Image (cartoon, grey):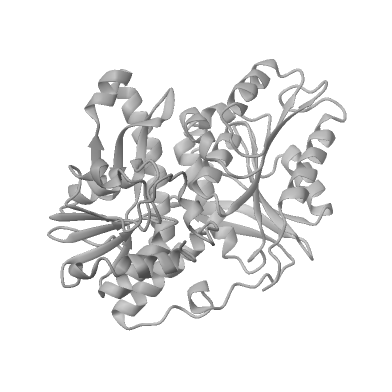
Amino acid sequence: MYSDRRDAGRQLASHLAHLKGAGTVVLGLPRGGVPVAAEVATALGAPLDVILVRKLGVPFQPELAWGAIGEGGVRVINPDVLQMAHVSEPEMASVERRERASLEHRARLFRAGRPPRPLAGSTAVVVDDGLATGATAMAACEVARAHGATRVVLAVPVGPPECERRFHDRVDEVVCPWQPQGFAAIGQFYRDFRQVSDQEVVDLLARAAAAETGQTPAAGSAASGTAPVHVGPSDEEVRIPAGGVELPGRLTIPDGARGVVLFAHGSGSSRHSPRNRYVADVLHRAGLGTLLFDLLTAREEGDRGLVFDIDLLSGRLGDATEWVRKQPAAAGLPIGIFGASTGAAAALWTAADLPETVAAVVSRGGRPDLALPRLHEVRAPTLLVVGGYDGVVLDLNRRAQQYLECENRLSVVPGATHLFEEPGTLAEAAGLARDWFSEHLVPDAPS
């Protein structure tokens, strides 16, 4: 067994010595492939980068990919799946628009402003921590080729016995030193196979970039070995840069806070909404911080199309989530998201994009069905709260719940309509949210 991903990377590198030299670029598949790739890049003396791909799924069966996209507008297509599934041009455009927004968000997160490594004329070594179905790795290799790599090598520490045969016509070389019989899952061949966080990927890439230029990571970053420190309390009006605009909000972190909850509201609501402020007060009394903010600017709020633009809303919510992590008052605190109406779809989409960051989600009268293509990727424990008299939305929530593979619960508040305006119903919904977040937003133990 490999001890961990670093050990796997060092052992894998010993099989790649023939690739040393100018023109080789090592590309890690985030997140688990990046620690492996970092060791390979160090051994080969090659630059390290991530290769970001998003599979384009068939609308009624998201796990079946009809293509994939990469940075720089690259798109590869599987015409056989398109023909078999009868995916229309509008459906293709809608899927690609959603996945493109997610890809661009992750690029901003991981690279911190650095441009992607040029691949034209290079030997691209695509690295992951193992090979299971191989669908993502295959898409990554095709994207690397589309970016101009003249030679593409797939390198993984472990995979099923047939992995070389499966890829022989897609790449120039497959390096997989361990292909055991009875292969079932990658994790069974690692003693330590804990999840890799987004921050760890960011740190490894920053460290590699700094080493290449002879610099050192900025003081105070996780890459420098100094973790951020939570210094609350705080209660202030803030401006949040997100998606090219600044969003107004209020960040409240009570003394001794155990977590912070972002509010993502839907149409007809705002950070000044009495309902949102009531729920926020309930959370404050339970020792939880909140960020009340608007996902749309004052000029945008009148555009009904933007209210249902889940790509736009989730992209901004993701940016706001990363912004909260960097605030001294909230640093180190676990993060939850409270979503209402279309904001609940944005919350679930963001949780799928940031599984290591979003620790819990609560949807109140939400539209999780609008995030259907990503629900199976949500890992954060999710509570769906719906009014008993909100029949249409209740039915939509029941259907969407079938696609959630995370810990989840549907709670119906008797006598409540969509806005929970009936006496006592909002208090019950707020109490459910408070209990869910209190249970699942558990701060990390001090190191």
Q: Nearer the viewer, residue 156 or 195?
A: 156
* Residue at point 50%, 42% (across, down): 314
Q: Nearer the viewer, residue 381 or 334?
A: 381
Residue 60, compared with residue 245, is above or below; it is: above
Q: Nearer the viewer, residue 68 or 38?
A: 38
Residue 6, compared with residue 320, is above or below; it is: below
* Residue at point 28%, 25% (across, down): 81
Residue 90 picture location, percent across and down: 32, 23
Question: In the figure, residue 129 lies in which quadrant?
Answer: bottom left
Left or right: 178 with respect to 326? left
Residue 327, compared with residue 146, is above or below; it is: below
Q: Residue furthest front?
A: 181
Q: Nearer the viewer, residue 90 or 15?
A: 15
Q: Is residue 112 visible?
A: no
Q: How many marks?
A: 0
Q: Is residue 166 visible?
A: yes
Q: Residue furthest right?
A: 424
Question: In the figure, residue 207 lies in which quadrant?
Answer: bottom left
Residue 417 picture location, percent across and down: 75, 21
* Residue at point 61%, 39% (across, down): 406
Left or right: 12 with respect to 347? left
Residue 349 picture location, percent across and down: 52, 40
Left or right: 172 with respect to 304? left
Q: Quadrant of the C terminus?
A: bottom right
* Residue at point 47%, 33% (across, down): 309
Residue 100 picture location, percent across and down: 36, 42
